[in-house]
Amino acid sequence: MLAISGIGTLVTNDASLERGKLGIINNAALVIGDDNKIAWAGESVNLPREFVGMATNVGGRAIIPGFVDSHTHLVFGGDRASEFEARMSGKPYTAGGIRTTMTATRAATNEILIENAQRLANEALHSGTTTLEVKSGYGLSVTDETRSLQVASTITSETTFLGAHVVPPDSKIDDYVNLVCGEMLTQCAPNAKWIDVFCDHGAFDVGHARAILTAGAKAGLGLRIHANQLRHGGGVQLGVEMGAASCDHCTHLNDADISALADANGRTVATLLPTAELCTRSKFPDARRLLDAGVTIALASDCNPGSSYTTSMPLVISLAVLNMNMTCDEAVWSATAGGAAALRRTDIGSLHIGAQADFALLNSSSHIHLAYRPGVQLINAVFKKGECVAGSLK
Ligand code: NIG
Ligand code: FE
């Protein structure tokens, strides 16, 4: 049992409280039960008498649900610092850089891949992320995709098979798509919950993406799609049509894409990845257009060595507010409850009674500071399943 009082701003995301989208309680207290779930949340003055003596007072600081980072590529070898340096001197970003990481990933031992993925997962945890989705996609052979998913499974249960990231060198696209839909899927499916495909210029077209997602669904995997990142194309509409949990990137959208996402009524979430735009010097998508149409948005880091080498969800939130026309409340919701929606989870991303006790104590009096103080470390403590896994309540 754990009780916390003196919470200046408690973001619950509990819609049933009818306190706005974030379900905010001021001057709040929180009780975590022995089952590591939220047992009670309310104003400190109403904290049940039996908890008053045991409660730790956090002196007016804010508590928010842990971030749900629903899109990362943490399994890879090497880095691409020289590609980044060249890009900052004017060279454009292309999907082709994925093959550089493929070579380094194939050359790395399982131990090195696990160590690198663990290091990044730990970095994410210290910046407030309590759930990570992790994709394969830098192996691009049956053996290397299979071991990439084994590595991903050591980090999270939200694992995604992304054999269809790009076509490896020396393969023909039709042969490679057949391999992805056949033997590679068979070997990878036991360690994957989701299947994803990079449907974009320089990667896979809509026809190939449809074949890959159809095969994944037949194997019992949930669907996700990288769509409309580099150019406008049919990826977003394909994702909605096939009932994907999420269409990710959504950088180049026309009105028909936005209506399709709106008509999905939250069943297909639009996942925006502003650090990918930041690190490739691309135009940010306009989240306001999506929100005004009623689309559910998730925010995620896209952590990978090419387009977005960061695990920081606070940075993602500040960019979403400062460059994508989201309000502070919308961005915090999308980085928590929105990420949970993109993973079709109701037990995380929110601090309603009965939810898993995953939360972060900030160094500030409210969640607004996450956007207001870009680049500043504001995470004081992180709790996962009721246990303090980083920092402290002091
Ligand atoms: O989501 N878009 C495809 N995949 C990654 C980038 C991969 C890379 O450049 O290594 C992304 O941005
Ligand atoms: Fe990605």
Image: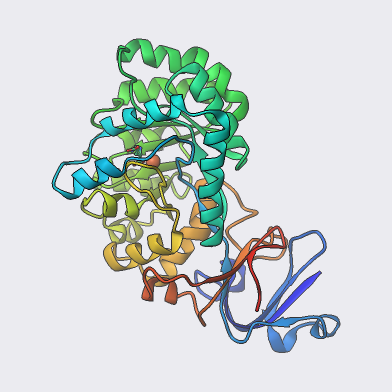
Where 366 sits versus 159, above or below?
Answer: below
The residue at the point 52 percent across, 25 percent down is 217
Extreme residue toward the bottom, this view: 45
Extreme residue toward the right, this view: 50
Which quarter holds ligand 1?
top left
Q: Is residue 192 visible?
A: no
Residue 100 picture location, percent across and down: 32, 30
The residue at the point 46 percent across, 50 percent down is 266
Q: Nearer the viewer, residue 99 or 257?
A: 99
In this picture, residue 267 sits left or right of residue 388? left
Total marks placed: 0
Quarter holding the N terminus is bottom right
The residue at the point 28 percent across, 25 percent down is 205
Where 217 sits versus 315, above or below?
Answer: above
Extreme residue toward the left, this view: 90
In this picture, residue 241 sits left or right of residue 113? left
Tell me the quarter of the picture where residue 390 sits. Answer: bottom right
Tell me the quarter of the picture where residue 294 sits. Answer: bottom left
Q: Nearer the viewer, residue 210 or 84?
A: 84
Q: Nearer the viewer, residue 11 or 214?
A: 11
Residue 221 picture location, percent across and down: 55, 29
Q: Is residue 299 visible?
A: yes
Where 235 sits versus 346, above or below?
Answer: above
Residue 380 picture location, percent across and down: 57, 72
Quarter holding the C terminus is bottom right
Q: Nearer the viewer, residue 312 or 83?
A: 83
